[in-house]
Image: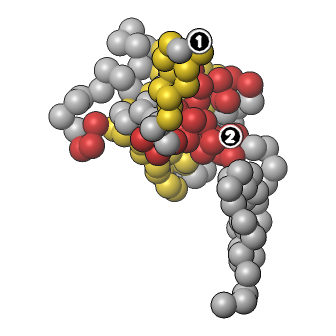
Amino acid sequence: MHSFHKGGTLVMTMVERPLAGPGSPVTALNVLARAGWTITNDRKANTFAFPPDRRVLVEFLPEANEFGPNETLWGIRAYDDLHQIVWEATFTSATPAEFIAAFLTDLADPEPLDPDREEDVVPAIAPADNASPTSDEG
C-alpha cells in the first residue's frame, strides 16, 4: 500500500494492481466503444457489447444472480459460424477494470492471428524502476 500526501494531508492511498478492486466498468467498456462495438443496456442495468460481426459477446452483469459461482460480473464468449461457444472467459466482481480493459483491448484488435502459430509471444511490459537486467553469471 502506498500513501500520497499533499501539504501534510493524505490525498489518496494506492494499492498493488492485483489488489486494487473493481474500479469503474466504463474503463473497460470504453475500449469496446472506441473499437466500434455496439453497446446496449437492458432495463436491469446490465450491459452487452458486440462487434459488427456479432461473433463475440461481452456482458457486464451487475444485476446478475449474486449466488452464482464466484459472483461473476463479466462474461465474454466467442461464437463460431453455427453460434456454438468456442471459448469463454469470466471475471469476478473484484477483478480490476484495468485488467478487463487490457483483455478487451487485445480482443478488439482487428489484426488477425494465425491459427497455427507456435512461436512464443511475450507482451512488452515496462520494467519497474528498481528492475535490473538478469545475468547468467552466478
Give x and y (percent) for residue 108.
70, 40
Measured as percent of width and height from the top left, residue 63 is found at: 31, 20
Colour pattern: secondary structure
Q: Residue 76: x percent and y percent? A: 49, 41
- Residue 138 appears in the figure: yes
Circle 2 sits on which residue?
Answer: 105
Question: Measuring 72% from the left and 55% from the top, which residue is drawn there?
Answer: 127
* Residue 25 seen: no
Q: Is residue 76 left or right of residue 65?
A: right
Which residue is at the far top?
43
| Disc 1 element | loop
The N terminus: image quadrant = top left
| Residue 74 vertical position relative to residue 6 in the rendered view, above or below | below
Image position, residue 5 (x, y; %): 55, 20
Seen from the viewer's position, the closer of residues 132 and 108 is 132
Disc ID at residue 7: 1
Asked which secondary structure carries label 2, the reply is helix
Looking at the image, residue 48 lies above or below residue 100: above
Residue found at x 57% / y 35%: 98
* Near-viewer residue (18 or 29): 18
- Amino acid carrying label 2: it is Thr
- The mark closer to the camera, 2 or 1, is 1
Determine crowd level at label 1: few under 14, some 14-19, many 20+ residues with C-alpha closer than 10 A. Answer: few
Residue 83, placed above or below residue 32:
below
Res 118 → quadrant: bottom right
| Residue closest to the far front | 8
Horizontal arrangement in the rendering, residue 28 relative to residue 69 (left or right): right
**Quadrant occupied by the C terminus:** bottom right
